[in-house]
Image: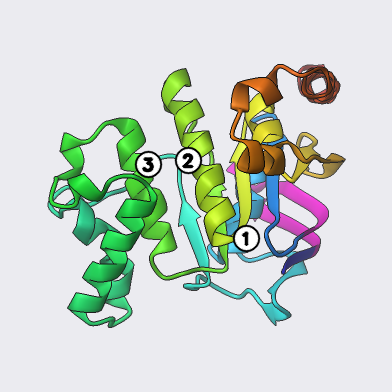
Amino acid sequence: MLKVENASVFFAGRDKQVVHALDRVSLEIPERGFVVALGTSGCGKSTLLNAMAGFLPLSEGSITLDGRPVSGPGAERGVVFQKDSLLPWKSVQDNVALGLKFAGVPRNESRDRAQELLRLVGLQDFAKAAPYELSGGMRQRVGLARALAPDPKILLMDEPFGALDSMTREQMQELLVSVWARTGKQVFFITHSIEEALFLGTEVIVMSPRPGRIAARFETDFVRRFAAEGDARAIKTEPAFAQLREEIRAIVHQSEDLVTS
């Protein structure tokens, strides 16, 4: 379990002003949990993720994984960003195996692991391709496989589908649910899309404008139902989904009004 307790972040802004980015945020991501953070730009979503990843120290509070403090980056936390950051001079397979190479895993073992993960994300036929030969969605599949290569306990995903067209985005959402269901990973996912948050999350947290706080929490079962039934359209068009989407939209819009007022 990843546990965040009373996490606050302050940092120096322009003109030496102190920016209060995150304020006393507490949450838990349990085994097989899929927590999605939603909110306006600047509400601290990425700050929270970067603290979970160990890229950013907390000013107050704590983050632990299985009871051990998070004090820096670690292989037990895989990170997927909006930009795939693939190395263009390496093949798809070598990009997936990059972290394993740095960890000293033997070449044959890392190659086999990369091939296994490329099958998982449906890219087994593109192992020798260069990243520039792939579409945006395919490149994000490579990024997902690379994050999974060290077998992390949790995936931290910062708007990974935000730059994709709507059709590819839906395909990637369904692929991610399949990977989550098959691997049992914990996931923390950031998005600006209410529908995406509802479809993916076992819990959706709505964050308030800076300083970022959790304004509302919603436990949902849409993602588990899709994993079991495989009919995304039926889930997204049912009344319960639409009702919750509008309830969350009202909270988000209220937050936006606070920012502009």
97 drawn magenta: no
Residue situated in front as seen by the camera: 135 or 84: 135
Q: What secondary structure is the stretch in magenta mostly built from?
A: strand
- Return the x and y of residue 231 as percentages of the image width and height: 61, 28
CA–CA distance in space, label 2 to label 3: 11 Å
Indicate the quadrant containing the N terminus: top left, top right, bottom left or bottom right: bottom right
The residue drawn where x is 77% and y is 41% is: 221
Residue 169 in the image, given as x and y percentages of width and height:
47, 28
* In front of the other: 7 or 30: 30
Highlighted range, magenta: 5-28
Expressed as whole percent of the image width and height from the top left, the position of residue 174 reads: 52, 36
In front: label 2 or label 3:
2
How far apart in space, not on screen, are marks 2 and 1 (Cα)?
26 Å
Which residue type does callout 1 highlight? Ala
Report which residue position mark 2 lands on.
175
Left or right placement of residue 162 versus residue 100 in this view: right
Residue 141: x and y in percent read 37, 44
| Amino acid found under the numbered disc labelled 2 | Leu
Pointer 2 or 3: first along the chain = 3
Q: Is residue 174 shown above or below 189?
A: above
Which is nearer the N-term, disc 2 or disc 1? 1
Q: Give the residue number, with chain letter if any, for mark 3.
A: 140
Give the residue pinned by disc 1: 51
